[in-house]
Amino acid sequence: MKTFAIFGNPVEHSKSPQMHNAGFKHLNIEAQYIKHQLEDGTTIKQTFLSNHYHGANITVPHKEHAFKNADEVRGIAKKIEAVNTYVLENNKVIAYNTDAPGFIKAIKSFGTIKTALLLGAGGTAKAIALALKEKNIEVTVLNRSENKLEFFKQHNIPNYSWESFKPKKYDLIINSTSAGLKDELLPCPTEILDSVLSQASFAFDCIYGKITPFLALAKTKGLEIKDGEDMLLFQGVLAFEYFTNTSADKKLVESMRKGLKGE
């Protein structure tokens, strides 16, 4: 039986195992998908190989370490410099980023978006920023401090720290930080959020399975809100295709969605 895993810290909240295991069951594939709490991201490749995993997903905070440690990086992940999927291929660790296309699929339901403000500057933010840029959506990145903004500068993506930011109108506000995951924190100061949310139409949070304080605030201002469930599903389906070398049809996607929801 092949074993797959999700690496993260924390990882106990992850619903990836129930989603992928539902996919394996649907296709009658002898495989299991488990959670792997990883403290030290620099050991990710070594841990992946020593546990004889055939594939893995990578979540916060290890996506950049996973990029640096892979034997080969493919697709948009080369630009993003962060990966969320490992696949064992001819004893080599091949890395992909399925967050970027997964996010674009997830926001389709909002309709036309021309401008976006992205909160946070981690691996997920890098994927989202480049995905938006590829779709000709003007994206601006806002992070607590300057020291994580160099990547966005290199890609000519407007970026600000909380101190230097001057709010303006954006169609979509995205939270890519972990604020609200295990606490009741907002991703940036209330005065900034009040200003940008008051002028926006949509709010998206990469955190899934709960209405975060960020989404709750957006809802009070009349925005259409969405959590990260669809992003998780669609990036998971793409990763599953890499894991199994199959092309997902509607029935597989639906079985994985049901798994994700615990149905």
Image: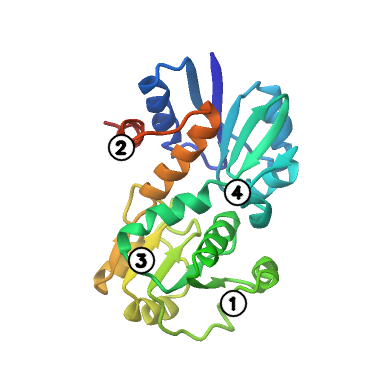
Give the spatial CA distance, label 4 vs label 1.
24 Å
Give the spatial CA distance, label 1 vs label 2.
36 Å
Badge 4, how many Cα within 10 Å: few under 14, some, many 20+? many
- The image shows residue 205 at horizontal and vertical percentages of 40, 58
Element assignment for label 3: strand
Q: Nearer the viewer, mark 4 or mark 2?
A: 2
Dot 1 or dot 3: first in sequence order is: 1
| Pointers 4 and 2 in contact (C-beta within 8 Å) | no
Quarter where residue 156 is shown:
bottom right
Q: What is the number of the mark on residue 77? A: none
Q: Nearer the viewer, mark 4 or mark 1?
A: 1
Badge 2, how many Cα within 10 Å: few under 14, some, many 20+? few
Q: Is residue 261 above or below residue 200?
A: above
Q: How is the image coloured?
A: rainbow
Which quadrant holds the C terminus?
top left
Residue 186 visible in the displayed image = no
Amino acid type, mark 1? Pro
Provide the residue designation for mark 2: 261
Residue 119 visible in the displayed image = yes
Q: Residue at x 44, y 38 (%)?
A: 237
Give the spatial CA distance, label 1 vs label 3.
19 Å
Element assignment for label 2: helix
Provide the residue designation for mark 4: 61
Dot 2 or dot 3: first in sequence order is: 3
Provide the residue designation for mark 1: 158
Quarter where residue 55 is shown:
top right
Dot 4 or dot 2: first in sequence order is: 4
Provide the residue designation for mark 3: 203
